[in-house]
Amino acid sequence: MVIIVPTTVQVTEKTLQMLNKLKEEMRARSHDEVIKTLISERKRIPRSMFGANPKLKSFSKEDEAEFHELLVRY
């Protein structure tokens, strides 16, 4: 089971506005997704390097839906 622990990052109001604008332009689901994309592009880090084990494949939509159902139940 994967437990996601949210973290607070302090940014200025202007930075938050910029993140929100990028989130909209990128059609990202979260600020986290925007930040990961920016880091990956800047450092040219493959998407496979994000996560607990870079050798694992990404979750399928079915996996994500199942995980979401588990979270809602508990």
Image (spheres, helix red, strand yellow):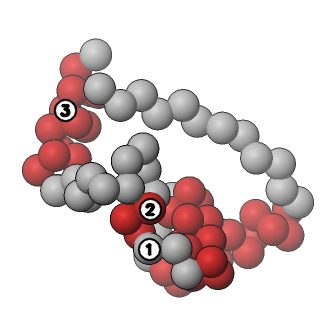
Residue 42 placement, left or right of 37? right
Left or right of 53, for residue 61:
left
- Judged left or right of residue 2, residue 58 is left
User: Regarding mark 1 in the picture, which secondary structure is present there?
Assistant: loop
Is residue 24 among what the camera can see?
no
Q: Amino acid at mark 2?
A: Met
Q: Nearer the viewer, residue 54 or 3?
A: 54
Determine which residue is flagged by label 2. 49
Q: Quadrant of the N terminus?
A: top left
Q: Are marks 2 and 1 in contact (CB under 8 Å)?
A: yes
Name the residue: 15% across, 38% down.
66
**Element under label 2?**
helix
The extreme top residue here reads 74
Q: Amino acid at mark 3?
A: Glu
The image shows residue 50, relative to residue 28, as above or below, that is above
* Residue depicted at x 42% and y 44%: 52
Q: Nearer the viewer, residue 23 or 57?
A: 57
Give the numbered dot on residue 46.
1
Label 3, on which residue? 69
